[in-house]
Amino acid sequence: MFGLCDCNNFYASCERVFNPSLEGVPVIVLSNNDGCIIARSNEAKALGIAMGAPYFQSKELIEKHQVRVFSSNYALYGDMSNRVMTLLKQMCPAIEVYSIDEAFIDFSGLTKEQIQLLGEKITTDIRKGVGIPVSIGIAPTKTLAKVASKLCKKYPRLKGCCLMYRPEDITKVLSTFPIEDIWGIGRRYARRLQSMGIVTAGQFCQIPESWIKTNMGIVGVRIWRELHGESCIELEDAVSAKKQICTSRSFPTEVYDLKILKSHITRFTTLCATKLRAQSGVCHTLTVFIYTNRHRPELPAQYESRLITLDVASDSTLELAAAALKALKSIYRQGFGYKKAGVILGGIQTKTAIQGNLFDTIDREKHNRLMKTWDKINLKWGRDKLILAAQDPEPFQMNRNHLSKRYTTDWNDIIKVV
């Protein structure tokens, strides 16, 4: 049996932990630069505030209903997530941290009664120990556990824990469960299935497996079998190395100056390279993209990207930054105001699998020693203590006009009792 522990409205719940006056009040959290709505409390959802909608488009509705607005406080959310996952690891035999607010749990070897009691205990203990409400769905497969966790949020009488294992109960739930909400069914497949009249998971289960294999491949077959109660997705006890690493940001205002863009691209590349070395990887390709503001149709528009293939896979910040600036120079156009930019590292493989090049002129051993020293210094003394000359020494400033305090990670923001 598998469980999925999902923190309810996680970002909004984190804000409520240290501000009890927010309980029962509509709350939303905004993305970088206060651009889009990325989290909503149940009260905000009931008002019709859409997920992912630009903040400025919903501002009238937000002000009308006195919705509390917060800028994304990732330092706080990351620490609260760590507290939830630490508690889970103490209570459960094995867990897989799936995202900042979700973790799969392995309930193998426990009876149904033991699983039910443990699920209820997890819900109670996390609420009491961290202050975050969670929903736990328990079922024979990971995909069904995802479905069960959604039922917890829909039906409060379940008290945060739904054990779904009887075939007749699973069939009944899937008969009305929207196909687009099934884990692994993307928008493209959902639209295709809906066009065929398949709108529920139950209808999807009735399609012959042969059709699924022909039209949706092995991924579709795996989803189909999981919905039939056959476990095809095992619990991963180790974090998988990323096959692609991306760092991107939206800017507070349009950027016209190439020098400023170079500084941002250098910083993004540095962050990507640091993550790459942390997983002992090297990359074969690097992509730089720059976008103008799609919400300003009166301004000239440009959406450009450039991919560069390295002769030898690398993890060197120096080499990758040089390639990124070369790519940027080739796509930058004077007179355009860029609102977003980013860097993507691809073709990632392990460092032990590097294939050399006879005409390679870079002293790679020297770069390796330099990068190790670089990472040690920045790890000990803090991010950006060592930077490239092309990078602005001042940290990237975002619009965060509704930022709450970092209650758990900054001594100056710790709550004081007087």
Image (tube, helix red, strand yellow):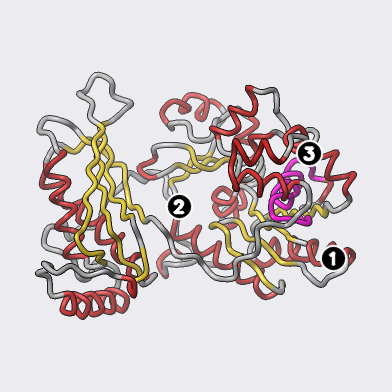
Badge 3 density bin: few <14, some 14–19, many ≥20, Cα 10 Å: many
In the rendered view, would you say 214 is above or below 229?
above
Left/right placement of residue 86 relative to residue 384 reads right
Q: Position of residue 5 (x, y in %)?
A: 68, 58
Badge 1 density bin: few <14, some 14–19, many ≥20, Cα 10 Å: few
Q: Which residues are magenta?
A: 138-156
Q: Quadrant of the N terminus?
A: bottom right
The residue at the point 63 percent across, 35 percent down is 180
| Gap in angstroms between the C-alphas marked 2 and 1 | 36 Å
Q: Toward which corner of the image does residue 45 lie, by quadrant? A: top right
Residue identifier under label 3: 174
In this view, the mark in front (1 or 3): 3
In the image, what residue type sits under mark 3? Answer: Leu
- Dominant secondary structure, magenta: helix
Badge 2 density bin: few <14, some 14–19, many ≥20, Cα 10 Å: some
Residue identifier under label 2: 404
Left/right placement of residue 60 relative to residue 397 reads right
Q: Is residue 368 magenta?
A: no
In the image, what residue type sits under mark 2? Answer: Ser
- Mark 2 element type: loop
Q: Position of residue 77 (x, y in %)?
A: 50, 57
Ranked by sequence position, the earlier of labels 1 and 3 is 1
Q: Quadrant of the C terminus?
A: bottom right
Foreground residue among 302 and 253: 302
- Mark 3 element type: helix
The residue at the point 41 percent across, 28 percent down is 56
Residue identifier under label 1: 117
- Mark 1 element type: helix
Q: Position of residue 416 (x, y in %)?
A: 51, 66
| Gap in angstroms between the C-alphas marked 1 and 3 | 25 Å
